Image (spheres, rainbow, N blue to C red):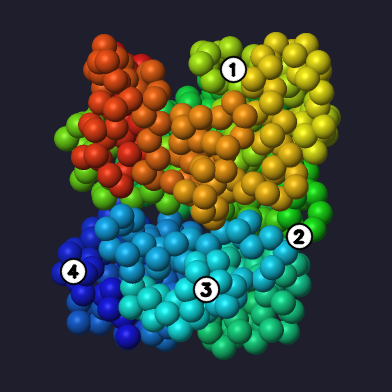
Amino acid sequence: MTPVEPALHPDACYLALKTRDARFDGSFFTGVTSTGIYCRPVCKVRTPRRENCRFFALAAQAENAGFRPCLRCRPELAPQGLRWSLHDASAVLAQQAARLLDEPEAWGVEAPSVEGLARRLGISDRHLRRIFDAQLGVSPLQYLQTRRLLSAKQLLADTALPITEVALVSGFASVRRFNAVFTAQYGMSPNALRREGAAGEASCAVRLGLRPPYDVDAMLGFFRTRAIEGVEAVGARQLARTLALDANGRRWEGWLSADFDETQPQVVLRVSESLHGVLPLLIRRVRAALDLDADPHAINARLHGSFPLGDGLRVPGSLSGYELAIRAVLGQQITVAAARTLAQRLVQRFGVPIATPHPGLHRLFPAPEVLAAAEGDALGQIGIVRQRQAAIVAIARGVAEGRLSLHPGADVPETTAALKELPGIGDWTAQYIAMRALRWPDAFPAGDVALHKALGVQQSRQPAREAEAASQQWKPWRSYAVVRAWSALSQGG
């Protein structure tokens, strides 16, 4: 059963396939009945005959129908294609379920399961399966298995990680189970798939696809103006930084770099050897931080009329939701340059050194446990006012104690409500964190002064209410409208 297929408009899909239009990469996959292979729209093999093509919205649908992933275009590189809706309750529920399955951080030490997923969503197992199948055409387990297999396939192709490690970091409980599932699904063993000449250096090089248009200069410019010396380094087409994260019961520290390819719509991710054990998690974080899974076609259909010069803009995310939240507090009611200065002082005072091969990367952002124990005097000495001191300590304690989750798999209403209960955090900060750390596409910081100016409501008696009213036409993409409004303001347009 693949109920999503008719909505794809097969003739339009075939036209995109013939032109190899990268704007539709990840929006659908083509199963070729004569070969048993499924491909991305950008695949460079000879275009199959129309009567031999079946179109699927998800890779999991294609695999459930018996097709194997193409070894040339590699479906695992495609950006995700889930659609956002704020009106269809069943679609919202299915999207939320898929979102949780896609986010390793949403599960902690618990292994993803249908029972656990249903419990988190507050519905029965049976209802979850029915909604998932009706909206996405596959079961939750089929969706999760495809994600794991494609993740493993990417690591086999792009890295020199031992197959045992590939199996475990991709979410399989044992190598034996991994080999059995992989061979049964793809008709070859992991050893047979592994390409010769895979990266043998200390850093992996993994390719991540994206859909054009994508304004690389704007994205990197955003990060560049906020970069903390020693923690981040932003070049013409590269974002590099140090990173520490807690996963799988331990702390991981290292560095990574993300380079935008000049010839293809993709990013090349390299990570230090010390982070190999959490590579799938890092891939998810980088995709979120650079907003590689956005669907420009759907977004521009809603926003182009209001912001015609922003079609390539994306919402900058973060590689650490906790770090983003701390920096959001530091930036309350001051300029970007002043916020960066405070963040620099915080890192120098509470961060720790780390050795990397990059001269500009030599320090880690302070850990939650460190800031949770920070005394007011120590924070005050670096210029942080008392109200923000309380907010920083409260966020750090919430994260350190596991009471506050700041990642794309977190429940948005619940998390924003929890944030606003903390001292010194109002709606602006909570919405800003939802937009960048939780990756909510419809966040809207209605009280933002720059946004008021961009929308021309700064002279109104109630500018926040005016901005909120104006934003209704941009749902469910108001986060993108905010970024476009800020960009238009900075360009004087």
Marked residue nearer the N-terminal end (4 or 2): 4
Q: Amino acid at mark 3?
A: Ala
Q: Are marks 4 and 3 in contact (CB under 8 Å)?
A: no
**Which one is in front, 319 or 153?**
319
**Which one is in front, 373 or 163?**
373
Marked residue nearer the N-terminal end (3 or 1): 3
User: What label sits on residue 118 in the rendered view?
Assistant: 3
Q: Residue at x 29, y 20 (%)?
A: 462
Q: Is residue 64 visible?
A: yes
Mark 3 and mark 1: Cα distance apart in space: 41 Å
- Local crowd size for mark 1, using a 10 Å CA cut-off: few (<14), some (14–19), many (≥20): some
Marked residue nearer the N-terminal end (4 or 1): 4
Mark 2 and mark 3: Cα distance apart in space: 23 Å
User: What label sits on residue 339 in the rendered view?
Assistant: 1
Marked residue nearer the N-terminal end (2 or 3): 3
Left or right: 349 with respect to 267?
right
Q: Amino acid at mark 4?
A: His
Q: Residue at x 56, y 59 (%)?
A: 103
Q: Is residue 337 above or below residue 415?
A: above
Marked residue nearer the N-terminal end (1 or 2): 2
Q: Amino acid at mark 2?
A: Asn
**The residue tagged with tag 1: helix, strand or loop?**
helix
Q: Dot 2 corresponds to which residue? A: 248
**Which one is in front, 254 or 444?**
444
**The residue tagged with tag 3: helix, strand or loop?**
helix
Q: Is residue 100 above or below residue 215?
A: below
User: What label sits on residue 9 in the rendered view?
Assistant: 4
What is the x, y in percent for residue 420?
Answer: 54, 36
User: What label sits on residue 294 in the rendered view?
Assistant: none
